Image: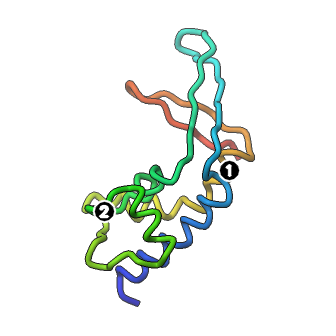
Amino acid sequence: MNDKMKLIENLIKAKKIYDKYLLNKDFLYVFKNKLNNKFEFFEMKCVRSNFLHLTGVETKIKALDFYKNLEKNRIPLSAINYKRNGTTKLKLQIFDRLPLLISTPVQVCFQDDFFYIKIRS
């Protein structure tokens, strides 16, 4: 199978997961910051225009148009590419795990000036 056809196949699969578990939902994560001992929070809003970023696909198509076109099976192969840094494949590989962000305990971790979510298993 052509590499870009495989990319489209993975994008369709990822969109189904995103639509089923995350689309049009807001999630509020509340946690105690162990560095300053204060309670903090962040909100995750899942809208159609965020889907492209989560995939890591390189394209000139606008985010919302990308989502709508994928829904209609109208993404030209010439308009999409894997990012050279390898993040596209990495991001698409974890889409199966996205439902865990809302169904299992998660841990907020800090690294440098950023925080990330770690799924506890």
Instruction: Point out residue 72 in the picture as x, y percentages from the top left corner.
Output: 49, 75
Instruction: Point out residue 95 in the picture as x, y percentages from the top left corner.
Output: 56, 60
Q: Residue at x 31, y 70 (%)?
A: 80
Comparing marks 1 and 2, which lies closer to the viewer? 2
Quarter holding residue 64:
bottom left
Say whether residue 121 is left or right of residue 95: right
Q: Circle 1 sits in a helix, a strand or a loop, which is it?
A: helix
- Residue 45 vertical placement versus 85 (above, below): above
Marker disc for residue 118? none
Q: Earlier in the sequence, mark 1 or mark 2?
A: 2
| Tag 1–tag 2 contact (CB < 8 Å) | no
Q: Residue at x 47, y 55 (%)?
A: 51
Q: Residues within 10 Å of mark 1 (few under 14, many from 20)?
A: some
Q: Residue at x 45, y 51 (%)?
A: 49
- Residue 50 vertical placement versus 33 (above, below): below
Looking at the picture, which amino acid does disc 1 mark? Leu
Residue for badge 1: 100
Say whether residue 79 is left or right of residue 88: left
Say whether residue 22 is left or right of residue 87: right
**How far apart in space, not on screen, are marks 1 and 2 (Cα)?**
29 Å
Query: Front-most of 89 and 5?
Result: 5
Query: Front-most of 71 and 12?
Result: 71
Q: Residue at x 62, y 48 (%)?
A: 24
In the picture, the quarter occupied by the N terminus is bottom left
Q: Circle 2 sits in a helix, a strand or a loop, which is it?
A: loop
Residue for badge 2: 61
Query: Front-most of 90 and 21?
Result: 21
Instruction: Point out residue 55 in the picture as x, y percentages from the top left corner.
Output: 43, 59
Q: How is the image coloured?
A: rainbow
Label tally? 2
Instruction: Point out residue 74 in the picture as x, y percentages from the top left corner.
Output: 41, 77
Looking at the picture, which amino acid does disc 2 mark? Ile
